[in-house]
Image: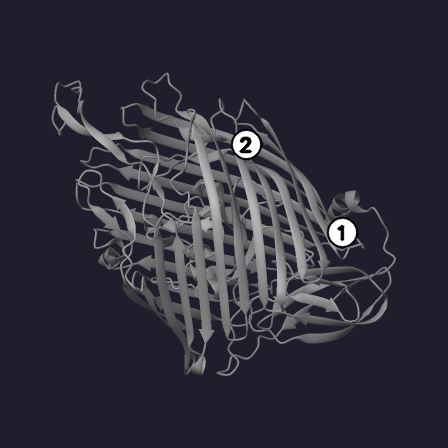
Amino acid sequence: MSRFLLVFISLPFLLYSQSTGTLRGFITDSTNGGSVISANILLLGTKQGAASDLQGYYFIPGIKTGKQIVRISNIGYVTREIEVRVVKNTITQLNVALVPASITLDEVSITGQRRPDMNDPSISIEQIPLQQIKSVPAGIEADMLRALKVSPGVTSTGDITARYYVRGGGSDQNAVVINGTVLYNPFHALGLFSVVDPEMIKMLEFYKGGFTSEYGGRLSSILNVVTRDGNKNRFMGTAAASTMSGKMSFEGPIPGGSFLFTGRKSYRPEAVQKFLNNRSAPFEFYDISFKLNYSNPNFYENGWFTVHGFFSDDKIENNNPAKEDYYFSNANYGLNWYQVWASPLYSNMTFTYSTFEGEVVPNKTSSKPRKNIIADFTSNWDFTYIFDSRDEIWTGFHNKILTTELYLTNLFGSKTDMKQRGLDMIGYVKYKLLRFETFKLDGGIRLNLVSASEKKPFVLEPRLNITYNPIPILAFRLGIGRFSQNLTTLSNEEELISIFEPWVVVPDYLKPAEATHFIGGIDYYLTEFLKLSVEGYYKDIDNLVDINELKYTSLDPDFVQADGRSYGVDFAFDFFLQSVFFKGSYSLSYSYKKKDGVEYHPRYDTRHAVNLQFGWIFWDGWQFNAVWRFSSGLPFTGIAGYYDKWNIPDPWGQWYAQGQYDPSFLYGARNAQRLPSYHRLDISLSKSFKIFFAKIDLDVSLLNVYDRKNIFYFVRDTGERVDMLPFIPSASVRIEI
């Protein structure tokens, strides 16, 4: 059966016959058996080589037969050189376990990236290892979403949120994907930090635009979370505590593979009050994750199976009937099969199920009850074939069954009870032209069948990325593509703080949202460790789905469509040495949204943004990190005046609690005013100790060192000013056994 399946899958790709030899294999970590990502595999004396992928797999075709010296290297590991004999018309398997560089007091180094393959046609992508995530002073604990805020082109609306915006797009235009499963609510504590425990993370792949044909479903960005495999060599565990939560993790070998389990739970709700300027914050949350890996050559040679799950829950119960309560939960499951076949073909198949539920309980407030439920079942089949010329052809078939339920009442008392279901059938194909040394191309097309839309059931998404490097240290990049999204969140642009933003499938009477990306950039390496880059972009967005704020009766549509555009330029430099690094960026951006014939700046529009990050390892292995951020003020809608609204009595003849007349706001032009500029300095000091059989990681952080009074919002009823985070000291400890 397996041979028949192999022949069937390989048949469309068998377009040539080999005349040389091929080298392939997996690069792993000798200490835990996990994959080593982005290892450089080079044939000495030639320009042939490859980089290992997320599974540690590499493939080098078209090699001259005979003896070859293979050099395998990666930052943080001891370089190896291995002699191997390449045989004509034969695929030679070479698996290599790299030994981590010794972590002694004299050999501690900051994880950075040397010059990658400048010919890679990808554009607007960052690979962020765990060590870089930990280098951002977090105050609570290391967090992947907060680490994104130092990336050029990424903005936020405040300290008290991990929600992020990429190059003028809304937060719902960003996908957070963990092991192929979409997280629809990746935030704990109303967005204070991510639901993903850093103990799970191995690396982040962050696509800020122009992502290639295998990715879709969003208009702005893809955050691909690459999780660790459990230790395949020994059992181990960790325990950690911060000012807000405690957590534990366990991992170790199982027959044919490994397991990883993590759990985290909040405690002392009053501790978070400091982060919200001593306002009531009765947070309760937890998250649990697990991952099982299995491989057996007697079952499927070069095949790996992964089962994973993730659960999170958030409760915000104020114990005050005059305030709202909030409830949020995630549940995700997934199965993955990664297979390297006997031919130059490998495949990746995933089956995932993801759910999210959010609810607002108004209690005795004047707000309305709201509830949102989403269920997502997805199956992905992806295949890659590599030619002797090093060119690659990719193809895949994705199916997504999506159901959303929305229950809410708007300000006029009109109810929306909507259940929407959609089936997306997606096919894509792309060709990566990699045979030339100075010119690389990634061109493809993605076809979406959107069953939920009667207006536009078929969406065609052509994409093209090009890289040209006239010299090895200089690369010119260009990206053009079309992207679509048939899922959106709803928010009120008049709200200064948006807590509940429900997901809905685009109704059948509307078109899916679409965006066109134009991106151009330059990468220049002054030295092996100093990189300068500049990237400009223009993004045009059509058919944004938005709530109908003018709905008065049940006959009016619940949703309308808007348009948007954004453009800007990002400047960045990265400097890495063994014990010091310095990253800096400046972004100039403009974003617009047009609704009901009126164009305005969305609330996340940030004109200028500066990020500076410094890290230094000094005496006896201590590490110092500092981050300084600046951004121009965010737009907001001011109050032009007040009026008395006459409340109509309810059917029982009783007036509302507020009285017959209710003072109401008369708003000015939408988002025509701006808050003052924002800036803040955070620093941290960390150290790892070894005590007997345990490793202890200690971190002390100081947030907002010079106590900048950054304004968050004004309370419209009282005019009270609410600031963001004050000066906050914090500490965390982690114990590994």
The structure residue drawn at horizontal position 22% and vertical position 38%, both measured from the top left corner, is 716
Mark 1 is surrounded, within 10 Å at the Cα level, by few (under 14), some (14 to 19) or many (20 or more) other residues, namely: some
Residue 613 in sight in this render? yes
Q: Secondary structure at mark 2?
A: strand
* Residue 402 image position (x, y, % from top left): 49, 35
Residue lying at the far top of the rendered structure: 555
Q: Residue at x 50, y 69 (%)?
A: 581
Please tell me whether residue 415 is drawn above or below residue 378 in the rendered image.
above
Q: Distance of mark 1 from mark 2, alpha carbons?
A: 33 Å
Classify 10 Å Cα crowding around label 2: few (below 14), some (14-19), many (20 and above).
some
Q: Position of residue 737 (x, y in %)?
A: 43, 74
Identify which amino acid the numbered label 2 is placed on.
Answer: Leu
Q: Position of residue 424 (x, y in %)?
A: 56, 33
Residue toward you, 401 or 27: 27
Res 169 seen here: no
Q: Give the residue at x 19% y 45%.
A: 720
In which quadrant of the rendered view does residue 246 lie?
Answer: bottom left
**Which of the two residues, 251 or 58, is positioned nearer the viewer here?**
58
Q: Identify which amino acid the numbered label 1 is placed on.
A: Asp
Coloring scheme of the render?
one colour
Per the rendering, the mark at residue 391 is 1
Q: Which mark is residue 554?
A: none
The answer to whether residue 456 is left or right of residue 732 is right
In the rendered view, does 116 fall on the left or right side of 183?
right
* 569 lies above or below 199: above
- Residue 157 at x, y percent in the picture: 37, 47
Can you identify the residue that label 2 sits on? 423
Q: Earlier in the sequence, mark 1 or mark 2?
A: 1
Which numbered mark, 1 or 2, is in the foreground of this view? 1
Snapshot quadrant of residue 655: top left
